[in-house]
Amino acid sequence: MTTKHHSPGCGHKGAIQMSLGMIVAVIFAVILLTSLIAWLSGMFEDITSITYEVTAIAKQNLIEDIETTGKVVGVAAPAVEDWARNKRGAITLAVENDNPNTLTTFYYHIYVENTLGLSNDVDHYFDTTSSWLTNAGTIDVPAGAVSTADIIISIPSNAETGTYQFRAAVCRGSPASNCHSASEHITGYDIASSDLYGSDQFGITVV
């Protein structure tokens, strides 16, 4: 009968390899868990830190207004007159696709168009206010339907008090940052974009 001889230390080596594998697995799991917690915390903060919101009724009224009046672009803003510094809010942009057969991607650009009670002209605040919100993007709209997008606005602590009149312009072509309606207040915007689809406006008074 043949007797098998085990080399000294084989079992110990296997135990060490298993321990290392477990350590690596635990470290990997901790990293994944940490990343997940950070992502969920960020998402939760984005939701809970919004002070000024558009009500569900206002959003529904916006959609009905677009569907019944022939407008293709509309904006619903929170029902507040004054926005405090360091606060976050949201406006709702709605776009109707007038093509009954094809899903269409529209390009939107939101920018300050006029100001009241501020110390400089509109051009002075054009770049500054663009950092308050995601001011350019896209919205996909199914054939013959209306789609909406919530635009988050963050008022910085150093925002100058006064009223800012914003324009939400929607175009059929890219880039979104080139989309604008005709404006007598903004340099270079005297003629609307050739592919302008529609626009609407809303105002924010910073106090």
Image (cartoon, grey):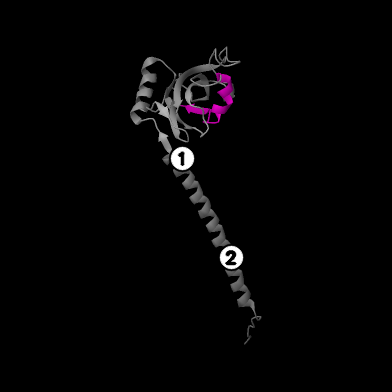
Q: Nearer the viewer, residue 169 or 183?
A: 183
Above or below, 52 against 13 in this view is: above
Q: Is residue 79 shown left or right of residue 159?
A: left
Task: Give amino acid for label 2.
Answer: Gly
Question: Where does the image place residue 13, in percent across and percent down from the top left?
Answer: 63, 74
Q: Residue furthest left?
A: 57
Residue occupying image coordinates x 47% and y 47%: 41
Q: What residue is disc 2 on? A: 21
Where is residue 49 drawn, in percent x and y? 43, 39
Numbered disc 1: secondary structure: helix
Please say whether residue 96 is visible from this viewpoint. Answer: no
Element marked by disc 2? helix
Q: Is residue 22 visible?
A: yes
Residue 61 coordinates in the image, percent (x, y): 35, 24
- Residue 134 on the magenta span: yes
Q: Residue at x 54, y 62 (%)?
A: 26
